[in-house]
Amino acid sequence: MLAPNDKALGKKIGKKILDPRIDIVNYSSKSEYNGTKLMGAYSIDADGIKPEAEMTLVEKGVLKQILNRATPTEHAMHSTGSARFTNNPRAVSLTTSVGTLHVKATGTTDADKMKKELIKLGKKKKLEYVYKITSPAGAESLQLYQINVKTGVERPARITSAVLPTLSQLEKIAAISSKENVYNLSKEVNTSVICPSAIILDDIELSSN
């Protein structure tokens, strides 16, 4: 994510890639957030470089910089101290990674009003149903709920796949929850993510086949 091997993203430095209400900050040494321990904290990267405690990657939706290791690349000439050892027990390997990624938002909506906003959008688009996708804590699968725009009643719906939103779809978000969630991830590298608990998009591709 926001790493130098993403050449297409590197070419977007200085350009809008997200909704203008969004800032993305990378923390290296922050070890706790609102009482939750952060697994992404580190003081020295795998190249022996001390990273900045806080780096702004996206500001008001505009990409400012991408992460890099010690080797200069076309779009990142200097190291950001982002070389991380992977969790591969069979070999010593490195990758470029965030420490703790904080997705900040302004102009947010109270978390308990997000469903109301989703239904409001459905009515505006003259839809019969809108959909809510959740990922329960500790679960790898997604859960889909169909919400009747007229009655507000929601029921589980089957889903076999969901296409993640593209950057272009995230340039204009209908609503962003004011509530934040904290996730600790350890699949490849120990990282943490702080982000809004929910967003509302105009469109997303789902499949039940």
Image (cartoon, rainbow, N blue to C red):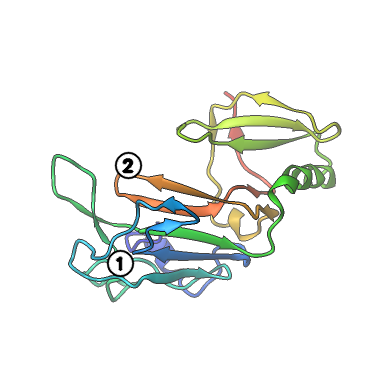
Q: Secondary structure at mark 1?
A: loop
Q: Position of residue 16 (x, y in %)?
A: 56, 69
Q: Position of residue 27 (x, y in %)?
A: 40, 64
Q: Which residue is mark 2?
A: 187
The answer to which of 186 and 74 lies nearer the viewer is: 186
Q: Position of residue 73 (x, y in %)?
A: 28, 70
How many residues crowd mark 2 within 10 Å: few (<14), some (14–19), many (20+)?
Answer: few
Name the residue at 38% across, 62% down: 30
How many residues crowd mark 1 within 10 Å: few (<14), some (14–19), many (20+)?
Answer: many
Looking at the image, the residue that sits furthest to the left is 91
Is 114 on the left-hand or right-hand side of 151?
A: left
Name the residue at 32% across, 42% down: 187
- Determine which quarter of the picture holds residue 91: top left
Q: Which residue is mark 1?
A: 68
The answer to which of 198 and 75 lies nearer the viewer is: 198
Which amino acid does the dot numbered 2 rest on? Lys
Quarter of the figure that contains the N terminus: bottom left
The answer to which of 152 and 164 lies nearer the viewer is: 152
Q: CA distance from mark 1 to mark 2?
A: 20 Å
In the picture shown, does residue 170 fall above or below 15?
A: above
Which amino acid does the dot numbered 1 rest on? Asn
Name the residue at 31% across, 49% down: 190
